Amino acid sequence: MHGRTPGRPQTEKDKMEYARYLLDQGNMTMQQVADKVVISRMTLHRKLKDAN
């Protein structure tokens, strides 16, 4: 395959930093944050857990 990397694309570091910022503000739910950064709620949970 030329020009393609096989496998699932990685969630960008910028998205997760923004998600953490939104959660730290305390006025959005996990679902709202996930919707805002365009990832699933479960992916958000998993990425935050892996980051800690």
Image (tube, helix red, strand yellow):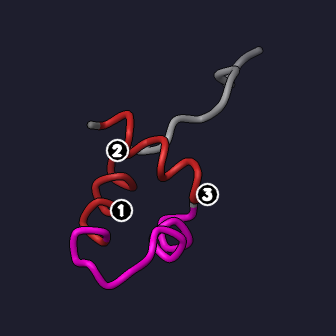
Residue situated furthest bottom in the rendering: 27
User: Which residue position holds label 1?
Assistant: 19
Foreground residue among 3 and 49? 49
Q: Nearer the viewer, residue 43 or 1?
A: 43
**Residue at point 36%, 62% (across, down):** 19
Image location of residue 8, percent across then percent down: 65, 31
Q: Residue at x 68, y 23 (%)?
A: 7
The 10 Å Cα crowd at callout 2, few under 14, some 14 to 19, many 20 or more, is few
The residue type indicated by label 1 comes to Ala
- Location of residue 51 with respect to 25 vertically, above or below: above
Q: Which residue is mark 2?
A: 13
Residue 6 is situated, as x and y percent measured from the top left of the image, at: 70, 20
Give the mark nearest the N terminus, 2 or 1: 2
Residue 21 on image: x %, y %: 24, 66
Q: Is residue 28 left or right of residue 42?
A: left
Q: Are marks 3 and 1 in contact (CB under 8 Å)?
A: no
What's drawn in magenta, residue-wise?
A: 23-38
Q: Secondary structure at mark 3?
A: loop
Q: Classify residue 17 by image quadrant.
A: bottom left
Q: Which residue is mark 3?
A: 40
Q: What secondary structure is the magenta-colored segment mainly?
A: helix
Q: Secondary structure at mark 2?
A: helix
Q: Which of pointers 3 and 2 lies earlier in the amino acid sequence?
A: 2
Q: In the structure shown, which secondary structural element does the residue marked by tag 1 occupy?
A: helix
- Cα distance between the residues tagged 3 and 2: 15 Å
